[in-house]
Image (tube, rainbow, N blue to C red):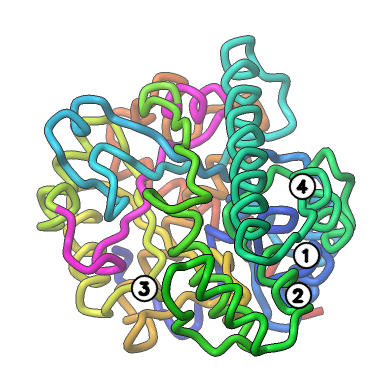
Amino acid sequence: MSDNVVADRLPVVNTHVHFPPNFSAFATVEDAIGTAIAEDVAAIGISNFYDQQVYARFAEQADAAGIVALFGLEFITLDPELEAAGVLVNDPANPGRVYFCGKGISPFRDKPAAAAATAAAIRGDNDARAQAMIAQLAAHFAAHGLDTGLTAAAVAADVAARAEVPADWVSLQERHIARAFAEALAELPVAERAAVLASAYGSPSGVDLDDSAALQGELRSRLLKAGTPGYVAEVPLSFADAYAYVLAMGGIPTFPILADGAKSLSPFEYPADQLAARLLERRVYAAELIPLRNRSELVDEYVQALTAAGIIVMGGTEHNTPDRIGYLPACADAALSDTARAAFWEATCVVAAHQHLVAAGESGYVDATGSLVGADPAARRVELIALGARLIGGAEESNQE
C-alpha cells in the first residue's frame, strides 16, 4: 500500500457495474453515465454477463463524459474437482460453482476461434435456459389461474425497449424473468394476486405485494431456484475455459469474493490468507469485493491478507437490483476504511493501466499465459499504479472542468 495515499481525496472508482440490457438499477446506458457524472465518478468497470454488444455504447458515452471506461466480464463456472469434493466456493448453495470475472479486457478485438466458440456457447446456453424457464413458469401460473402469455421473445423485447437497445443484445437473466412475472401479477387486484401466488407457491406470499422489488426476489427464490417449478439448471463453463477466455480477450483473471454475503463463510474463501494461497495456486492475481454485502472488518481482513500476498483487490457495487445505491462502494455496516478505499483505488489503477497497455500492444499486469509481467512484481505494480493514476486523473480533471 502506498504511504502517501489519502483515501478521502481519492476519485470515486467502481470496477463492477452491470449495465442494461443486463438486469440493472439503471434504465439505460445514458441513465448510468448521467448518474456517474452527478456523483463525480472517475472510472467505471462494466461487468456484464452473456453479451457485450452494449460495450461500444458504454465506451462512447463514458469517454464523452470524461470517465475512464473499464471493460470486464462475469461468468458462472464449474470446477469439477471442487464439485466432487463438495467444496463451496463463492456460490453459497452449489459445490464447485465459481463466479469468476475478467478485468481490463479488450472487448473490440477480433476473438480467436476458441474464444469465439466460448462466447457463442455462453450466450446460446443462457438463452436456451431462459426460454425454458419462462415456458415452465408461464405454464405453472396458467395452471394456478393466471395466463400471462409471456414468452422469451416477449420478455426480451420488453427488456430491449426499456434499455433502448436492439433485441439481439438481450440475453435474459433470472431477474428479468422475475420482473416480467411480477408485472403480470401487478395487473390483478391485490386479493386476486394474493390468491394466485398462494396457489402457485403452495402457501401464502410473505412480502408486500405492492413492493415490486420484494415480490421479484420472492418469485426468484420460490419459483426459479433449484427444486421449484421454473428451475432449469445452468450450463456453466469450466473454470479452465473461463480463465482461458479472459486471457484471450486480453484481460486479468479475477476472483469475486462472496465472504459474509452468505449465511456462513465459505471454507474455500476463509480464512483470507488461505484464499490468497488458493488463488495463487490457480494463477489468479486479482480479486474483487462487493463490500455492500460484507462487514467492514471482514473487508479489511481480506484486503490486508490478499495485498500482502501480492494480489490486487478492487471493489464494486454490481447495481444488479432495482436499488439506486451510490457508485462509491460502501460496506454493509459502514463506509470503506481508508485501507480498503486505497487498495481499491490502486487495483483500479492497475486495471486501467493494463487495459491501456494491452490495447496498445504492450505488456500489462499479466501476460497471455496469466503470469505476472516483470521480474519484480511489486515494482511492476508500482509502475502500473502510477500509469493508471495518470489515466484516471485525466478523467478526474475533465470532470472538474
Asked if residue 58 shows in the view, the reply is no
Mark 3 and mark 2 residues within 8 Å of each other at the beta carbon:
no
Label 4 to label 3: alpha-carbon separation:
33 Å
Instruction: Give neighbour class at mark 2: few <14, some 14-19, many 20+ (Cα, 10 Å).
Output: some
Instruction: Please tell me whether mark 3 or mark 2 is closer to you in this view.
Output: 3
The residue under label 2 is: 399
- Identify residue type, mark 3: Arg
Label 1, residues with CA under 10 Å away: few <14, some 14-19, many ≥20: many
Residue at 58 percent across and 82 percent down: it is: 194
Q: What element carries label 4?
A: loop
**Disc 1: which residue:** 66
Q: Mark 4, residues whose alpha carbon is within 10 Å: few (<14), some, or many (≥20)?
A: some
> To which residue does mark 4 refer?
151
Badge 4 amino acid:
Thr
Towards the viewer: 79 or 139? 139
Q: What element carries label 1?
A: loop
Is residue 134 within the magenta segment?
Answer: no
Q: Residue at x 18, y 47 (%)?
A: 276
Q: Which amino acid does label 2 sit on?
A: Asn
**x and y percentages locating residue 168 in the rendered image:** 83, 38
Quick one: SS at disc 3? helix
Q: In which quarter of the image is the N terminus?
A: bottom left
